Image: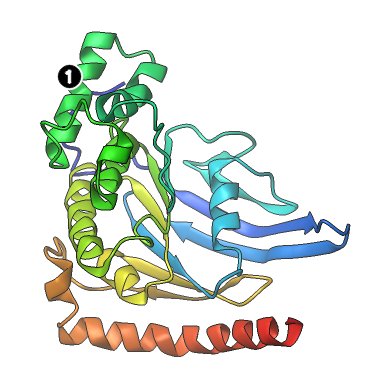
Amino acid sequence: MGDASPNPTGDRAARIEIVGLTKRFLTPKGDPFTAIRDVSLTVEPGQFCAVVGPTGCGKSTTLAQVSGLERPSAGGVRVGGQLVDGITKGVSYMFQADSLFPWKTVLDNVVLGPTLLGTPKKQAIALARDWLRRVGLAGFEDRYPHQLSGGMRKRVAMAAALINRPRILLMDEPFGALDVQTKAIMQTELLGLWEELRPSVLFITHDLDEAVALSDRVAVMTSSPGTVKNVFDIDLPRPRGDVQQIRHEQRFLELQGQIWESLRDEVNRAYAMTAAAA
């Protein structure tokens, strides 16, 4: 367990290599279903990579393979050069739905991570208080999740995800349920915290503006079975600052337009498939 000091060089970050990844399931009726097919993508150490694609294309399935929560049917994932064959070490996961324990206070939710890693209780509490201060929740340590707004709960979740200084941060539409204004605030706060620690990030989103504003690279996935169609480098300078300001820049609009050209066909194809099935 490291201390709480910033890590701007991302020297603990790990390279993520996804090669030929395929995942098949059996439906409740027993029919075979291929969720993703031959997915290949590399995220360099300390890089922020967003993944966009139509609903049901296997974005979340891909994250589950990287985390080690699921095993691939074919292909594989390497993290820091090591083949993933179980739960990946040094990974934090942030979901769209609140993953906080409702019966625990804000402080107890955040302190859980370092405690599980064996950090002495006094040190873990001090670390948790520091992270709550970083996300603007000093003074809310004794509250319970149901006593917080949606944005405040996301701040707690970010503190819980980052307190262990993960090598990899997996984020599955973490801000999808928030209103537009709160989402923009959370995106800006996430960028600031990521700039300090620089873990490697895989960020799933349906929001193309969000993907461009946050990322170094944006991968576009095809409709089901999902695979990587295109990868776009986002050359907007860092640090980015306020994401609301970034959205008005000419280069942002150019990149957003290019990615939408690639994504639009997949969204239309997925919609047509769903309509036909219905």
Query: Can you tell which quarter of the image residue 221 is in?
Result: bottom right
Residue farthest to the right? 30
Q: Mark 1 belongs to which amino acid? A: Ala
**206 or 199, which lies in front?**
206
Q: Name the residue under label 1.
A: 126
The quarter holding residue 50 reads bottom left
Q: Where does the image place residue 52, in percent across and percent down from the top left?
A: 46, 71
| Residue 85, visible in the rendered structure | yes
In this rendering, is residue 158 above or below 235? above
- The kind of secondary structure element at disc 1 is helix
Q: Nearer the viewer, residue 7 or 137?
A: 137
Q: Quadrant of the N terminus?
A: top left
**Which of the 4 quarters of the picture holds residue 60?**
bottom right
Q: How crowded is mark 1: few (under 14 residues within 10 Å), some or many (20 or more)?
A: some
Q: Where is residue 203 in the image (x, y as percent from the top left)?
A: 40, 58
Q: How many marks?
A: 1
Image vertical order of residue 167 relative to residue 108, above or below: below
- Is residue 168 toward the left or the right of residue 72 in the image? left
Of residue 99 and residue 261, the one placed in the foreground of this image is: 99
Q: In this view, does 87 lie to the left or right of 151?
A: right
Quadrant where the C terminus lies?
A: bottom right
State whether residue 118 is above or below residue 154: above
Q: Residue at 25% x, 52% y: name it.
A: 151
User: Relative to 272, is 258 on the left or the right?
Assistant: left
| Image spot of residue 277 (x, y percent) | 75, 82
